[in-house]
Image (cartoon, helix red, strand yellow):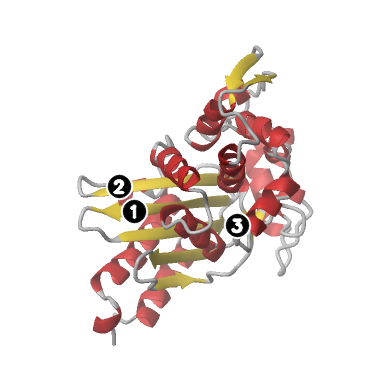
Amino acid sequence: MNPAQVIRSAREELDDAGLRGSFLVRDLDSGEEIGIDTDVELPIASLVKVPLAVATLERVARGELDPAAAIQVAPGRITTPGPTGLSRFRHPATVAVEDLLYLSMSVSDGLAADALFALTPPDAVAAELRRLGFDGIAVRHLIRDLTETPAERLGPVDAHLAHSLAIDAATAGHGHPVAQLDVGRANTGSARAFVDLLQGIWRPSTLHPTTAVRLRDLMGNSLQRHRLAPDFTSDASRWSSKTGTLLNLRHEVGVVEHADGQTFAVAVLTESRVPAINQPEAEAVMAHVARTLRDHLRAFPTWDRS
């Protein structure tokens, strides 16, 4: 199939699964890419932890932050499903800056991320992205705001109602009465913006070399392996990524490095039309579509396309 046929088939598969979103796969060496609605802006949930880590590590590289500095962190005491790490602690803890980075990125700990935001606030993270030349990602609020949605107020029994609100209340321009889902108020980005950031991490030009190395390590050690990882991990490939989830949003961005040397950045940002908390079928479709786009690039380089 030619690229247009691949994209048309992928759109149909997503629609059948009740999904829409922003997809992009790019060969990091040739620059070849294929995607679906690559510039559509969506709230990014925990994906914001990637630019937060970038800004934190750049400050470490400049000597503004000590990675061994001990930070006092109050317990999150969250009991609702989802949050991990310090967010579920019942007692205060003292954690080094560098270990907060690990918890934030590899474990997706929201409380650890907010401890880092206390050192480098959202507006400073946004400024750091601009300094480094990365556009298209808006950083506006803390992670704790993601735990203050209708889902938490309604509780597990009625959580499907929160998902219905998330789906039905959105405007055509992605405005929303739920602030965390409103592109004018939320942390936002697109598949293209995140692929550009991934390229900057795997093929650094503006990032400090130590920043890029540490970020690749953190993403390579992610414990969230249920979404795209099954379709990109093998004995002959390495998958490094970060996920993001909020109400009907399911995202993942990452890089697959093949043993033959080919390296692809993959960004998948989706929203579901199905009011259900657990949607393994949707996540399987996300992964299949992303892999199909990667397979097309891998099998048909520029000089072979028709």
Image height of 60 relative to 166, above or below: above
Question: Looking at the figure, which quarter contains the N terminus?
Answer: bottom left
Q: At 56% across and 40% down in the image, what residue appears?
A: 61
Of the pair 41 and 245, the residue shown nearer to us: 41
Q: Quadrant of residue 31?
A: bottom left
Q: Which mark is residue 238?
A: 2
Residue 279 appears in view: no
How far across and down, in percent of the image, does residue 300 sit? 26, 75
Residue 5 appears in view: yes
The disc, 1 or 2, on the residue closer to the chain's N-terminal end is 2
Query: Which kind of residue does numbered mark 2 sit on?
Result: Arg
Q: Which mark is residue 256?
A: 1
Image height of 31 relative to 109, above or below: below
From the image, tell me which residue sits under label 3.
Answer: 132
Q: Quadrant of residue 59?
A: top right
Q: Is residue 229 left or right of residue 243?
A: left
Q: CA distance from mark 3 to mark 2?
A: 26 Å
How far across and down, in percent of the image, does residue 158 sit? 66, 37
Of the pair 141 and 287, the residue shown nearer to us: 141
Are discs 1 and 2 less than 8 Å apart at CB? yes
Are discs 3 and 2 less than 8 Å apart at CB? no
